[in-house]
Amino acid sequence: MNTINDLPELKQQLARFQNHLIVNIAGELKRINRRVYMRELPFVPFTNSIKKDIDCIYLDDQSAPTIEVPFLEYKRKSIHDFIAEKEMDHWDLISLFEMLQAFFPFESNPPLTFSLISEEEYISFYEKWDNWVCLCKNGVGIEGFQTCDQYGEILMATIGSGWEDLYRCARCGRIFSQLSHKIIGINTDPNPEE
Ligand SMILES: [Zn+2]
């Protein structure tokens, strides 16, 4: 058996490999353009002791993949930290990338009333008044907002309904995340009965 005398080089290779995969995971999350919940993946690529605590993965403000663990003390953590703390290994990292690569956010064809938006747009949020103002100028005290699914169809925010964190503008149908305020699409026919 050969003696390893190029350990620093091997460590560097491993670090490069890790960074390379994380950059690619970020690319897939950008393509998917929303949070990916662990329940949507074939399996949870983390060490057994924390599997059940992992909620979702998304890109943070700096476009770094971030993992949310709402019931743990630290709430959210980067992939680098998960690996450094041995809660995820490099095989898990490969699996995560492969699953995200195969992930398409719509299980079926989206309804005709749904379209994605091309611009990166956000709903305005005024924390002081706890109010959202849509790009169409609708607000909480005007026509308001409704909880909805990824296509902007009304969905009650009850346990088991599958509701994530999406709201739609009752006036123009823009669909956005209540956490990031990012608009993910638009329901072009939000009030078909009218
Ligand atoms: Zn609106």
Image: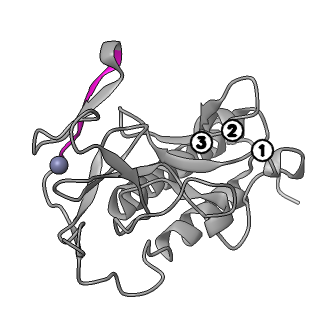
- Give the quarter of the image for residue 93: bottom right
Q: Name the residue carrying label 2.
A: 69
Question: Can you tell me whether the CB of the residue at mark 3 lies under 8 Å from the nearest atom of ligand 1?
Answer: no
Q: Name the residue carrying label 1.
A: 53
Amino acid on which disc 1 is placed? Asp
**What residue do we see at 35% from left, 32% from top?**
62
In the rendered structure, which segment of residues is drawn in magenta?
Answer: 120-127
Was residue 60 drawn as part of the magenta stretch in this picture? no
In the picture as drawn, the residue positioned furthest to the bottom comes out as 109
Amino acid on which disc 3 is placed? Ile
What is the spatial separation of the Cα atoms under label 3 and label 2, in whole angstroms?
Answer: 7 Å
**What residue do we see at 55% from left, 63% from top?**
97
**Callout count:** 3
Viewer-proximal residue, 161 or 72?
161
Q: Name the residue carrying label 3.
A: 67
Report helix, strand or loop for mark 2.
loop
**What residue do we see at 48% from left, 63% from top?**
155
Dot 1 surroundings within 10 Å: few (below 14), some, or many (20 or more)?
some
Specify which label sits upstream in the sequence, 1 or 3: 1
Dot 2 surroundings within 10 Å: few (below 14), some, or many (20 or more)?
some
**Is residue 191 found left or right of 14 in the rendered image?**
left
- Give the quarter of the image for residue 112: bottom left
Determine contact: label 3, label 2, CB under 8 Å: yes
